[in-house]
């Protein structure tokens, strides 16, 4: 890797702490990822992206800004990236998945708040995230209570804009959301100094539909037994979709899928046929949160699907490509987003139907209903999910964890007991 210290210094990072973070990450990545047996050759590209995730990609964003382009940061899949692309901007994900930034966040946020929020805010406060430093606008949303209140504090440190997400899916909620999308378009135009034109928006929709389709293809490959790619690798790819250039990323995922489909045709996999197969349903896992996958696959099972925003909640059907004017295009974007079934919505029975369908499609032997500690929407919804799974005769295990390593022992014990039941 080239020496990016001058760039990081210019961005105002805490160089010493940032070096330490990259050092730890590289060791963890080497242990968890690079030692996996029989990895697809196509993972080499994603290993490269990880090795340059605070380097080359950040440099691309810095260069983009030097040429007058703008960068937007987001914490949620409801932020309409299409509009940002259509105005010549770039959108990056800012969700934190590391424990290291949490102490800084706890200076201003309560300790009993979900790790994703604390880690995200902490990355800014501790000077550890080059992405937030290159953002011209950070976009929050009113999804869960923790997020919407945290934005009030984060807004003291970064230029912040909050989108109001409805909590139900009645027609009037759609109308509210369309208004929010229009207001967001105006904001993006103000920040970029460029009008969102229908042709550019259509092009952006096609681009992001292609990215979702490539990821859907990856997830279809994971339905095979033996599974052709580990859950760890699949999770990583989805996590990187929030950072990488969408066109380049789509090409690389499709190239990897060619390889996976050849593996499937030859009956080859990363684990033996008959390995217990698990679906994970719950809160998102922001990079570098690989904890549950590492434990599950370390215990000899395969994670074959994630029902989460770092999984299938990203892979909704494509946005309709409409020929009519801008207004209809914006509504089509909004309608597609309302197919994302986050626990912040009530009622949210579509999510339960999704989980049952995914368990069938991915031939899951069991489902891990997992939750980030202190995430109330997903935790409470977990009860309904457990009941539905029980009714459908699908074994499930409910796990709650955070980003620390303190609970690894008890988690391992519970997972092994669950796998024992599945094997029997
Ligand atoms: S659409 S899942 S990305 S909000 S885990 S911060 S809900 S307390 S991340 Fe999410 Fe958008 Fe929904 Fe997806 Fe709050 Fe829960 Fe923390 Fe969460």
Image (spheres, grey):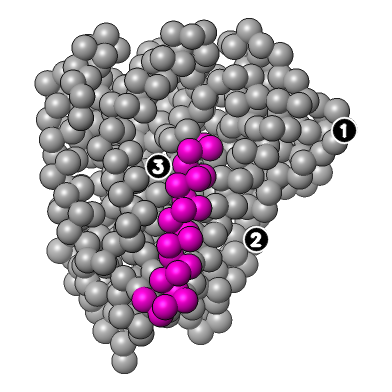
- Indicate which disc residue 350 carries: 2
Mark 2 packing: few (<14 Cα in 10 Å), some, or many (20+)?
A: few
Q: How many numbered marks are there?
A: 3
Question: Which mark, residue 112?
Answer: none
Residue 280 in the image: x percent, y percent?
A: 42, 64
CA gap between label 3 and label 1 equals 33 Å
Of the two numbered discs 2 and 1 on the same chain, state the one appearing first in sequence.
1
Residue 211 horizontal side relative to residue 167, left or right: left
Residue in front for this viewpoint, 164 or 159: 159
Q: Which residue is pictured at 32% across the width and 57% down the height?
A: 41
- Magenta stretch containing residue 362, yes or no? no
Q: Which residue, given by chain and number where applicable, does mark 3 sit on?
A: 240
Answer few, some or many: residues within 10 Å of disc 1's Cα (few below 14, many 20 plus, some between 14 and 19). few
Cα distance between the residues tagged 2 and 1: 30 Å
Residue 133 drawn at (x, y percent): 36, 17
Whole-percent x and y of residue 296? 27, 67
The verdict on label 2 being within 8 Å of ligand 1 is: no
Q: Which residue is mark 1?
A: 324
Residue 111 in the image: above or below residue 71? below
Q: Which residues, given as a range, are shown in magenta? A: 246-268
Q: Is mark 1 within 8 Å of ligand 1?
A: no
User: On the image, which quarter does residue 172 sit in?
Assistant: top right
- The answer to which image quadrant residue 271 occupies is bottom left
Q: Nearer the viewer, residue 249 or 165?
A: 249
Left or right of 118 on screen, residue 35: left
């Amino acid at each position: 890797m080239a020496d990016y210290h001058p760039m990081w210094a210019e961005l105002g990072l805490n160089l010493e702490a940032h070096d330490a973070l990259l050092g730890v990450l590289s060791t963890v990545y080497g242990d968890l990822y690079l030692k996996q047996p029989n990895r697809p050759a196509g993972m080499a590209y994603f290993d490269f992206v990880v090795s340059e995730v605070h380097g080359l990609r950040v440099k691309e964003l810095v260069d983009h800004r030097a040429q007058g382009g703008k960068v937007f940061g987001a914490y949620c899949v409801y932020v309409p990236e299409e509009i940002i692309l259509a105005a010549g901007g770039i959108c990056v994900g800012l969700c934190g998945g590391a424990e290291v930034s949490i102490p800084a966040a706890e200076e201003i946020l309560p300790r009993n708040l979900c790790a994703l929020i604390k880690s995200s805010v902490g990355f800014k406060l501790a000077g550890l995230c080059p992405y937030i430093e290159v953002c011209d606008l950070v976009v929050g949303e009113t999804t869960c209570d923790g997020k919407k209140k945290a934005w009030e504090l984060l807004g003291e440190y970064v230029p912040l804009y909050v989108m109001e997400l409805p909590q139900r899916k009645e027609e009037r909620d759609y109308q509210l959301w369309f208004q929010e999308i229009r207001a967001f378009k105006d904001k993006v135009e103000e920040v970029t100094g460029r009008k969102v034109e229908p042709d550019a928006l259509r092009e952006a929709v096609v681009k992001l539909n292609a990215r979702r389709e490539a990821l859907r293809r990856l997830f279809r490959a994971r339905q095979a037994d033996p599974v052709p790619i580990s859950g760890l690798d699949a999770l990583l790819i989805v996590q990187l979709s929030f950072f990488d250039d969408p066109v380049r990323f789509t090409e690389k995922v499709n190239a990897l899928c060619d390889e996976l489909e050849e593996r499937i045709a030859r009956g080859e996999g990363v684990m033996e046929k008959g390995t217990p197969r698990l679906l994970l349903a719950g809160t998102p896992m922001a990079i570098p949160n690989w904890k549950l996958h590492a434990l599950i696959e370390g215990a000899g099972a395969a994670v074959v699907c994630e029902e989460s925003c770092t999984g299938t909640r990203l892979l909704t059907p494509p946005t309709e490509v409409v020929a009519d004017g801008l207004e209809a295009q914006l509504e089509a974007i909004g309608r597609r987003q309302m197919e994302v079934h986050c626990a912040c919505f009530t009622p949210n029975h579509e999510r339960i139907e999704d989980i049952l369908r995914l368990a069938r499609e991915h031939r899951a032997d069991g489902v891990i209903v997992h939750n980030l500690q202190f995430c109330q929407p997903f935790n409470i919804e977990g009860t309904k999910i457990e009941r539905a799974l029980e009714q459908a005769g699908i074994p499930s295990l409910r796990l709650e964890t955070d980003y620390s390593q303190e609970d690894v022992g008890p988690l391992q014990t519970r997972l092994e007991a669950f796998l024992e039941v599945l094997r029997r």
